[in-house]
Image (tube, helix red, strand yellow):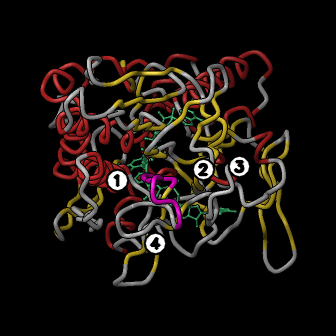
Amino acid sequence: MRKPKIVVLGAGYGGLMTVTRLQKQLGSNDADIVLVNKNDYHYETTWLHEASAGTLTPDQVRYDIANVIDRSKVDFVKDTALKVDTEAKKVQLEKGDDLSYDYLVIALGGAPETFGIKGLDKYAFSITNVNTARQIREHIEYQFATYKVDQKPERLTIVVGGAGFTGIEFLGELGNRIPELCKEYDIEKDMVKVICVEAAPTALPGFDPELVEYATALLERKNVEFRIGTAIKEATPEGIVVAKGEDDTEEIKAGTVVWAAGVRGNPIIVESGIENMRGRVKVEPDLRAPGLSDVFVIGDCSLVINEEINRPYPPTAQIAMQQGELVASNLAKLVNGKTNLDSFNFDNKGTVCSLGDDDAIGVVFGKKLTGTKASFMKKMIDNRALYMIGGIPLTVKKGKFNLLK
Ligand code: FAD
Ligand code: NAD
């Protein structure tokens, strides 16, 4: 009998969790497992704010996929998926031949959501992958270096669009990095402006107000200026335009604009004609796409409703990894001829938001944390993700062990 072929698209948190669990649950005679990813490395998306600010190097936030997959059970294909033909059950790749599948797992992560705001695609950076992180880091350094030559003050202004978790974590890293850059480039600290523009009436909307206050006060002490209740309307070659009052606007000149104001699903979902909301598929309880019994969608490409509040769970690595575990066990069931698939229940362990390497805020198992305790917890969470995918060897190689900084 022909072995079923399982194709997993994307080697992020969801995809690698699926594959590393599948290789434990299935023998090499049970199924052909193929993993497709753009690069031959995995990057920790949850560490990209550090690589963007320059507090970690790009190499510190990535590792070779070959380190965590069992080559005797998993074929790795380094290629870019372009489109899925769900009728023909094939994935179109950029370089290689079309890849057929019996079961498909789409775990391609998210893409920046720009809400059609003019100029953002062209003039703003986004914290999306290792390459965009490197670009942000290099761009900021270039601005500092060039300021010493042309003295244009706007080169030293950095605008961060959005005070969600990504924006706040990036600001925390900048707070530590900028003094280093000032020293390196011989620039007075008060020449540098970091402005965070947030459309909602508060930073970190929906998060515990006391913790939000802790975070904004700490960042303000590190010279971050918050423009709360202010929406970015446009990005230009000179900076950004924000809404002011009912019908007025204001221009903020800035050499660097980083858009950290939201994510949507991978464009492939729309391209492939799979039913979606902003590129995310509202999945069935067993994580299959509606009407597609052989396609599972997980991570930032999926949308799972929190029944308690009837709103989608925010897309996180935490949920992507739990989904990966469930998809692996459901696939193992299908391969073994069982049809009683399990439903996904998100086990929310909490949220910790770093404020640089040495501080953080969080709610873990319902308990509020700040300062060193929260920062310790954040590093433990980062290490846990490495451990879950690559066990002790990966954790020892890539883990964060400066736990009590
Ligand atoms: P990803 O982990 O992003 O992986 C997608 C993979 O698919 C990548 O390897 C990519 O290269 C590959 N890929 C993309 N397109 C293609 C293609 N066309 N063909 C082939 N391969 C492709 N969540 C938390 O729970 N905790 C945190 O502390 C946290 N911190 C964050 C900090 C930052 C700065 C950011 C940006 C996000 C953070 N998140 C956090 C959210 C979390 O990172 C995402 O929800 C999570 O990465 C989603 O996992 P995923 O498996 O769907 O995609
Ligand atoms: P987000 O959607 O959570 O936050 C975006 C912020 O941008 C919001 O506060 C929104 O009001 C603001 N915004 C939207 N349009 C704007 C405009 N025109 N002008 C100014 N502000 C605008 O997005 P994110 O922070 O990128 O997070 C994406 C996902 O990743 C979320 O699910 C988040 O929970 C997760 N994440 C988690 C962590 C963590 O757990 N530590 C860290 C980073 C990201």
Considering the numbered disc 4 on the image, is that residue within a helix, a strand or a loop?
strand
Image quarter of residue 248: bottom right
Q: At which x and y percent is residue 241? A: 81, 56
Q: At which x and y percent is residue 28? A: 24, 26
Horizontally, residue 398 falls left or right of residue 232, namely left
Considering the numbered disc 1 on the image, is that residue within a helix, a strand or a loop?
strand
The residue at which mark 4 appears reads as 312
Sooner in the amino-acid sequence: mark 2 or mark 1: 2
Q: Nearer the viewer, mark 4 or mark 1?
A: 4
Residue 47 in view in this figure: no
The residue at which mark 1 appears reads as 353
| Res 271 label | 3
The residue at which mark 2 appears reads as 86
Cα distance between the residues tagged 2 and 4: 25 Å
Q: In the displayed structure, would residue 209 be above or below residue 387?
A: below
Q: In the displayed structure, would residue 359 be above or below residue 94?
A: below
Q: Quadrant of the C terminus?
A: top left
Q: Nearer the viewer, mark 2 or mark 1?
A: 2
Q: At which x and y percent is residue 329? A: 23, 50
Q: Of 41 and 268, which appears nearest the observer?
A: 268
The residue positioned 17% from the left and 34% from the top of the image is 24
Cα distance between the residues tagged 2 and 3: 12 Å
Specify start and end residues of the magenta stretch as a single range: 291-301
Horizontally, residue 89 falls left or right of residue 15, namely right
The residue positioned 53% from the left and 50% from the top of the image is 224
